Image (cartoon, grey):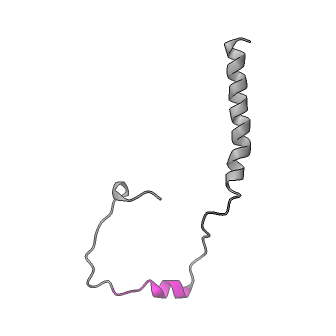
């Protein structure tokens, strides 16, 4: 078996594996559920921040995940 054919077989096997593995990873329900905000959520967000010091956090200083 020449190396070109072996490379094609390995590539095809990897693509077939990813084709089945990626959609299956969404079946585990370990994520979170996003719901739309209600008027009560917006009213609760209007808290008094008068004594808080403003801090600017850039994208590069934020934590992942």
In the picture, measured across the screen, residue 34 lies left or right of residue 17, that is: left
Name the main secondary structure of what is drawn in magenta: helix
Q: Position of residue 7 (x, y in %)?
A: 67, 21
Q: Residue at x 40, y 59 (%)?
A: 63
Q: Residue at x 59, y 76 (%)?
A: 36
Start-end of magenta stretch: 39-48
In the picture, measured across the screen, residue 45 lies left or right of residue 57, that is: right
In the rendered image, residue 43 lying in the magenta stretch gets the answer: yes
Q: Residue at x 27, y 73 (%)?
A: 54
Quadrant showing the N terminus: top right
Q: Is residue 21 above or below residue 65?
A: above
Q: Give the number of marks.
A: 0
In the rendered image, residue 4 lying in the magenta stretch gets the answer: no
Q: Position of residue 17 (x, y in %)?
A: 71, 38
Q: Residue at x 67, y 63 (%)?
A: 29
Residue reaching furthest top?
A: 2
Quadrant in the rendering for residue 12? top right
């Amino acid at each position: 078996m020449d190396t070109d054919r072996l490379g094609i077989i390995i590539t095809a096997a990897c693509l077939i594996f990813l084709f089945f593995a990626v959609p299956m990873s969404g079946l585990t329900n370990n994520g979170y559920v996003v719901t739309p905000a209600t008027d009560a959520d917006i009213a609760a967000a209007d808290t008094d921040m008068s004594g808080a010091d403003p801090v600017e956090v850039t994208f590069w200083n934020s934590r992942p995940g």
